[in-house]
């Protein structure tokens, strides 16, 4: 086999392999800026997440990014995210408004600011992902808030939390998803499941 034919053969073989791999909706893992991400694509929609190394007021926190590569609109909510534990119990993510209220009432401004710093380090390390409607857009409101510490903490928490978002085709968003923990525990062993847009993204597969 000539060299060019040999190269063409392997390019074709690789393309078939990748097509089959993608068709099975396999979870792909990668590391970026110290965080370990899992990513899964179904029906043109891609969800990726990483567990952040910090807890705030009895919440485990996931950094989440969603990209809509389908042909129609797609709605995502934090309540669509559930962590299925190996012991059979599940932890459903809290709604954004309740998270913001709890963080302001109990966590305090310093905790929220530390969370923002950690989130930004992870987000800006994702050079291959550019959000069209996420934290960078929401933070403009946070920066415009006056000098009141409580107001700044509220605005910062609102900016980082993933909120219900309707994504048009080719749009993307990101945000923090908060999973309530009992008595400052940990999530333990298990996997994430996201049920949204008529699809189930099971990150155990």
Image (tube, rainbow, N blue to C red):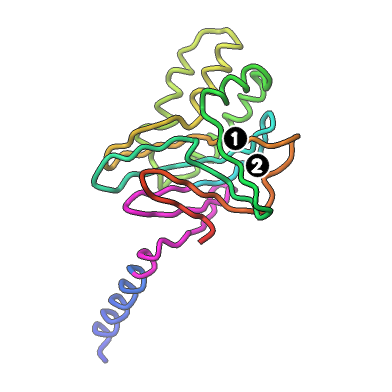
Q: Which stretch appears magenta? A: 20-48
- Classify mark 2: helix, strand or loop: strand
Does dot 1 land on a helix, a strand or a loop? helix
- The circle drawn on residue 118 is 1
Check if residue 29 falls in the magenta segment.
yes
Position in image of residue 170 (x %, y %): 28, 42
Q: Quadrant of residue 98?
A: top right
Residue name at image x 30 percent, y 48 percent? 69
Does residue 173 sit above or below 148 in this rendering?
Answer: below
On the rendered image, what quadrant is the N terminus found in? bottom left
Q: Nearer the viewer, residue 42 or 199?
A: 199
Which is more toward the observer, 174 or 139?
Answer: 174
Q: Quadrant of residue 137?
A: top left
Residue that carries the numbered disc 2 in the rendered image:
53
- Give the Cα distance between marks 2 and 1: 8 Å
Camera-side residue: 2 or 198?
A: 198
The quarter holding residue 67 reads top left
Q: Residues within 10 Å of mark 1 (few under 14, many from 20)?
A: some
Percent coordinates x, y for residue 134 in the rendering: 41, 32
Q: Residue furthest bottom?
A: 1
**Residue at the spot 60% in from the left edge and 37% down from the top edge:** 179
**Where is residue 111 drawn, in percent x and y?**
66, 25
- Label 2 crowd (10 A; few <14 / some 14-19 / many >=20): few
Name the residue rendered at 51%, 18% in the picture.
Answer: 155
Q: Is residue 40 above or below residue 125?
A: below
Q: Is residue 76 magenta?
A: no
Which mark's residue is nearer the viewer, 2 or 1?
2
Where is residue 177 drawn, in percent x and y? 54, 36
Q: Are marks 2 and 1 in contact (CB under 8 Å)?
A: yes
Q: Is residue 151 above or below residue 199?
A: above
């Amino acid at each position: 086999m000539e060299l060019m034919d040999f190269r063409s053969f392997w390019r074709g073989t690789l393309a078939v392999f990748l097509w089959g791999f993608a068709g099975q909706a396999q979870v792909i893992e990668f590391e970026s800026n110290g965080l370990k991400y899992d990513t899964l694509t179904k029906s043109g929609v891609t969800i990726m997440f990483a567990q952040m190394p910090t807890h705030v007021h009895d919440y485990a926190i996931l950094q989440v990014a969603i990209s809509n590569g389908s042909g129609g609109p797609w709605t995502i909510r934090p309540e669509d995210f559930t962590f299925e534990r190996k012991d059979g119990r599940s932890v459903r993510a809290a709604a954004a408004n309740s998270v913001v209220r709890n963080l302001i009432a109990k966590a305090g401004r310093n905790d929220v600011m530390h969370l923002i710093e950690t989130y930004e380090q992870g987000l800006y390390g994702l050079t291959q992902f550019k959000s069209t409607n996420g934290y960078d857009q929401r933070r403009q409101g946070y920066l415009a808030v006056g000098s009141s510490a409580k107001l700044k903490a509220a605005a910062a928490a609102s900016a980082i939390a993933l909120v219900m978002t309707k994504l048009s085709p080719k749009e993307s968003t990101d945000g923090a998803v908060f999973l309530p923990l009992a008595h400052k525990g940990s999530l333990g062993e298990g996997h994430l499941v996201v049920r949204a847009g008529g699809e189930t993204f099971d990150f155990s597969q």
